[in-house]
Amino acid sequence: MELQIHEVDYGGILHQVNGCWQGGQVVGLLGPNGAGKSTLLRLLAGLRSPSSGRVTLNGQDLRVYSPRQRALHIAYLPQELPKDIPYTVTDFVEMGLYARRGLWGSLSTAHHRRVPEALQSLNLGRYKDTPMASLSGGERQRAGLARCLVQGSPIFLLDEPTANLDLYHQLDILNRLRTFANDGYLVVLAIHDLEMAARYCTTLVLLAKGRVQVQGEPVNVLTEQRVAEVFGVPVRRFEDPYGDFIRFSFSQSEPNLQASTVDCRQEVEAASR
């Protein structure tokens, strides 16, 4: 599986964005609020079309795929699911199988088994008959991940999948995503935690004001100078004493708000269209 973005502009939010990512990678999108991470994920999912440039899936323009065809290849989880979803957890997760249904809407026994297996694996089994509207934000997020799991697509596009999750479930999800990548999946996720991104992502894409500042291995992307420039916060980088991970110590001084602040209005307007 290969997902590629070629010289893409979008509505004054993204500018000349390029990238080529393949199965086996966990690609982390990093950057300040309003940098264009969510918009980029929507373009990669085929939910938006570029103003110029192209997004391709396995060398073919993503716009030629029907929604059903896209669903067979790409699972997408937005940053936040609505609070008033009028379905039980089981019904909501089972909707991830719509592209797998046969001519008369039938599903194989193997497909039916995916739903309880996904719920159990994400510690949601006891909520199977619970209305989605009764769940907490973190539980809804895990239900969304379960729906992506049952979809069975080889590409996961996830907008802050660890938001609202406690530490146990953050680590569980990120470990799971890394395992998927080891099995050949392509995972692209927006993430704010620099240390988690450095630890679990194989590739990082650092965005600021709609432009890719740098992309590559975490150790090369998250330099002290670059983090300070993009986020406006002076840092010291060091190796974790218990593992081969990058850690950061943040300065006690006031952050440089002028350097880190990005006008979010255009992205908010685009998301609402």
Image: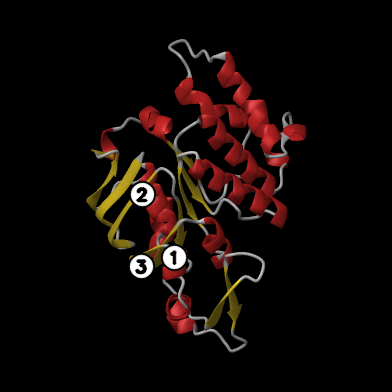
Q: Name the residue tied to disc 1.
A: 34
Q: Nearer the viewer, residue 191 or 24?
A: 24
Q: Is residue 207 visible?
A: yes
Q: Disc 1 residue type? A: Gly
**Direction from residue 60 to residue 213 in the image, left or right:** right
Q: Quadrant of the N terminus?
A: top left
- Residue furthest to the right in view is 126
Give the residue furthest to the top: 104
Q: Nearer the viewer, residue 262 or 208?
A: 208
Task: Tell me the amino acid under the disc marked 3.
Answer: Val
Percent x, y of residue 197: 53, 61
Q: Is there a contact, CB below 8 Å, between mark 1 and mark 3?
A: no
Query: Quick one: which residue is furthest to the bottom in this view?
Result: 253
Colour option used: secondary structure
Residue 41 against residue 70 in the figure, above or below: below
Q: Is residue 85 above or below residue 104?
A: below
Front: mark 2 or 1: 2
Q: Earlier in the sequence, mark 2 or mark 3?
A: 2
Crowd class of label 1 (few under 14; some 14 to 19; many from 20; radius 10 Å)? many
**Mark 1 or mark 3: whose residue is earlier in sequence:** 1
Left or right of residue 119: residue 53: left
Q: Quadrant of residue 229?
A: bottom left
Residue 83 visible in image: no
Question: What label sits on residue 21 in the rendered view?
Answer: 2
| Circle 1 or circle 3, nearest the eye | 3
**Is disc 3 surrounded by few (<14), some (14 to 19) or many (20+) residues within 10 Å?**
some
Q: CA distance from mark 1 to mark 3?
A: 17 Å
142 on left or right of 219: right
Task: Identify the residue position indicated by label 3 in the image.
Answer: 214
For the residues marked 2 and 1, what is the alpha-carbon distance in whole angstroms?
23 Å
**Residue pictured at 65% horizontal, 53% vertical:** 171
